[in-house]
Amino acid sequence: MARLSVNVDHVATIRQARRSQEPDPVTAASLAELGGADGITIHLREDRRHIQDRDAIILRKTIKTKLNLEMAATQEMLKIALELQPDMATLVPEKRQELTTEGGLDIRAARDSLKKFIGTLKEAGIMVNLFIDPEPEQVKAGHRMDVSGVEIHTGRYCDAKNEAMRDGELKRIYNTALLASKLGMAVHAGHGLDYYNIKKVAEIKEIEEFAIGFSIIARSVFVGVEKAVREMKELIR
Ligand code: PXP
């Protein structure tokens, strides 16, 4: 059964709306673990719109599962990651104007600087995944850079307007996952997954881990974090 890493950024988004102390993503992470989360994901963005440095530091000390830090490949974030020592770093593209991470990294375009960046993180004992669109070419480029694995962007699958488009996107995700798995890379997936669209991707056995945030936190408002996580775990199973 694939693992579930729960992204708690959205709890911090609510807190930051009032620059308040609550709700605390640290509390949400503990409850997510009680509900069976296998890991906690946070995205420390350059503009600190949701997760704050303080959240990352406390989560590193308090969670009992694995910490996945989503980060842009910048020198500021590299320094923070080396100090924080997350279990895994997922490198994502970051644009200030976007509502959320809108696309995968174009690895082919960023090759040399990225390779050095990845090497520094790996030398510090941090697993490095690249967030990529479901395109086999991106897997091959990532493999040449010696990354630990990829996280496949499932956004287009989730946003598909009709069945035919959804099936097409699912096939792309499957082919990308298959190639990454054959190359011995870790295969993760995420973005836009919810209680309705998870089932078909969860059938792709090459995917070892899902990173899911928004749908779980949205459901938590009504049923609580623990139950919302448990229900998602059940669907993945
Ligand atoms: N994976 C990555 C790389 C992301 O940037 C995000 C969004 O922060 C997610 C997974 C989770 O997406 P969602 O909140 O839509 O479940």
Image (cartoon, rainbow, N blue to C red):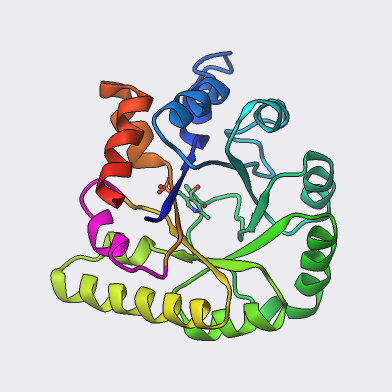
Q: Nearer the viewer, residue 145 or 126?
A: 126
Where is residue 105 drawn, in percent x and y? Answer: 59, 69
Where is residue 237 drawn, in percent x and y? Answer: 29, 51
Apparent side of residue 70 relative to residue 7 in the rendered image (left or right)? right
Check the image and report above or below for 76 versus 185: above
Residue at horizontal 77 percent and vertical 66 percent from the top: 118
Residue 3 visible here: yes
Check the image and report above or below for 72 versus 177: above
Apparent side of residue 22 relative to residue 87 in the rendered image (left or right)? left
Q: Is residue 162 magenta?
A: no
Apparent side of residue 140 relative to residue 212 in the rendered image (left or right)? right
Apparent side of residue 161 relative to residue 8 in the rendered image (left or right)? left
Q: Nearer the viewer, residue 183 or 224?
A: 183
Residue at horizontal 51 percent and vertical 24 percent from the top: 30
**Which quadrant of the view contains residue 189?**
bottom left
Instruction: Label the magenta part by its dominant secondary structure.
Output: loop
Residue at horizontal 65 percent and vertical 36 percent from the top: 48
**Which quadrant of the view contains residue 154?**
bottom left
Q: Count every numbered label the image shows and give the total.
A: 0
Residue at horizontal 61 percent and vertical 61 percent from the top: 93
Residue 108 visible here: no
Check the image and report above or below for 61 versus 88: above
Check the image and report above or below for 151 versus 27: below
Where is residue 59 drawn, in percent x and y? Answer: 65, 29
Q: Which quarter of the image is occupied by the N terminus?
A: bottom left
Q: Specify the farthest residue to the left.
A: 163
Residues in magenta, as a range: 194-206
Q: Specify the farthest residue to the top.
A: 21
